[in-house]
Amino acid sequence: MTSIPSLTSNQEKNLVTDLQQWALANSLIIYPPDFKSYQPVVAPVTLYPTPFSRIAFEQANEVQLAYNELYIKVTNDQDFLLGIIDELSHFDQEFTGKLYQTYLKAKEIGIKQNLKLGIFRSDYLVEGSEIKQVEFNTVSVSFGGLSTKVGQVHKFLNNIGNYDPESKGQLYYKEEDLPVSNSIEALAKGLADANYYYNGEIYKTDTIVLTIVQEGERNVFDQRLLEFELLSKHGIKSKRLSLSQIELETFVDSNTSKIFLKSTGEEISVVYFRAGYAPSDFQNEADWNARLILETSLAIKGPDLVTQLAGAKKIQQILTDEEILSKFIPNNSEHYQKLLKSFVKIYPLDDSELGKKGKSLAFETPEKFVLKPQREGGGNNVYKSDIPGFLKSLSEKEWSAYILMELINPSTFVNKIIRNDQVLKNEIISELGIFGVVLFDDKEVKVNENAGWLLRSKFSSSNEGGVAAGFGAVDSIQLV
Ligand code: ADP
Ligand code: MG
Ligand code: MG
């Protein structure tokens, strides 16, 4: 099937009602922008699954363990990583610099926990039938919860015959072509594993997971789905606090560095960061101090500051250098070849040879590129013809904090997106994210696993596809 079903307006109305009621009943929901009353709405979703190359889907899933391994090794090679971060800090004092300074302070105080939890998501666009990496995220990766749900709702609508009401029994999509992401299960399992290793490889349910959240977070249900799974499957409770609540709500035992909730006395085994990835997550010095308290506590951090810093876009750019990549992943291995194949060209904008080339390309053929700062969460990039003017507004020294990446040109598909009760038909572009979970220290990898996937789609007319930012929708896959 390469196009969406053609339904009468009545049939589509039924389909939309069924989708919305399933979504409300099963937590495929989000708070609307600027919400004041706590009334959730159906999350922006596509009405139909989007066709996705089976080969590309397999490639992306297969390369995840290699990516996990690569970022474990980068995180553990602190001379390499922190050397780059140190340099970057001069050009991006506002955020990368602050994260790094906080890490240095933590190191001075003493970092008690060697184990690091990485909940990663590697994002791709498909060009031809090849996956090309957009970016690798090491902190606050989202939509693992809603991804499972959108797969389930599309499967439900298919199974009840809503995609092809006239066919009497013949389903529009083949059941086996609609995979459902196991991300809720797999990400909750990652948190449970961290709890297990925190407790010396003993299965305990009296220690809890602390989720660090943004104030005014809209994507709450995506997070809570993981918490509910953690409790129902693993018996582990979680608590949600913002950075500004840490000092008031927790205390650290100065002998053991164990961190506890003041209200209940419960010990925190894992700190799961769904905040702390953007400058605006830190309102003041007290918030940075809260981050420091967590970093120096015995709890396992998902992620710790070094793992978070490994996700810098500058690091992604440097790893596309074959020589550097081969320092981490042997160049005669299958993993190496797979990683290399998934890269597009990324240039620095510094004084190196490659940097000089990047600088001239940015001005000669800006329409082929996207310029990225060291930021996360969408809405930060500069595209195509905007690049030269943007660069000219900075001093040339500051360009070092940006990377220049070749634009990937994925094929488009016409689907419908439901947003605010409106059904919008449009050409879309889809970005696949593969989740990975790792737990490791500098000696051993305890966990390295795939953890499901996410398909996000945006109108092809918009440059960026953030769902929460209002540009996109959560989608599911029809394997073709
Ligand atoms: P962020 O960390 O803010 O999510 P990304 O690198 O993912 O930053 O960029 C945001 C969005 O910009 C992506 O989701 C994608 O839609 C678009 N984008 C980024 N890099 C490319 C690229 N090389 N080619 C095409 N689109 C891109
Ligand atoms: Mg990102
Ligand atoms: Mg992104």
Image (spheres, rainbow, N blue to C red):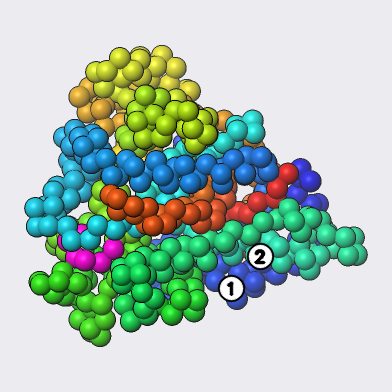
Circle 1 sits on which residue? 26
Q: Residue 138 in the image: x percent, y percent?
A: 37, 49
Q: Name the quadrant containing residue 299.
A: bottom left
Q: Amino acid at mark 1?
A: Asn
Q: Which residues are magenta?
A: 295-300
Q: Nearer the viewer, residue 279 or 85?
A: 85
Q: Is residue 347 above or below residue 30?
A: above
Q: Are marks 2 and 1 in contact (CB under 8 Å)?
A: yes
Mark 2 CB near ligand 1 (8 Å cut) = no
Q: Tell me, yes or no, whether the highlighted magenta stretch contains residue 297.
A: yes
Q: Secondary structure at mark 1?
A: loop
Q: Quadrant of the C terminus?
A: top right
Circle number at residue 153: 2
| Image point (25%, 77%), residue name | 267
Task: Give the residue at the far bottom of this rendering.
Answer: 264
- Residue 42 makes an appearance in the image: no
- Does 5 sit left or right of 436 as displayed? right
Q: Amino acid at mark 2?
A: Val
Q: Residues within 10 Å of mark 2 (few under 14, many from 20)?
A: many
Q: Name the quadrant containing residue 173.
A: bottom right
Q: Secondary structure at mark 2?
A: helix
Q: Earlier in the sequence, mark 2 or mark 1?
A: 1
- Does 445 sit left or right of 232 as displayed? left
| Image point (71%, 63%), residue name | 155
Q: Nearer the viewer, residue 204 or 216?
A: 204
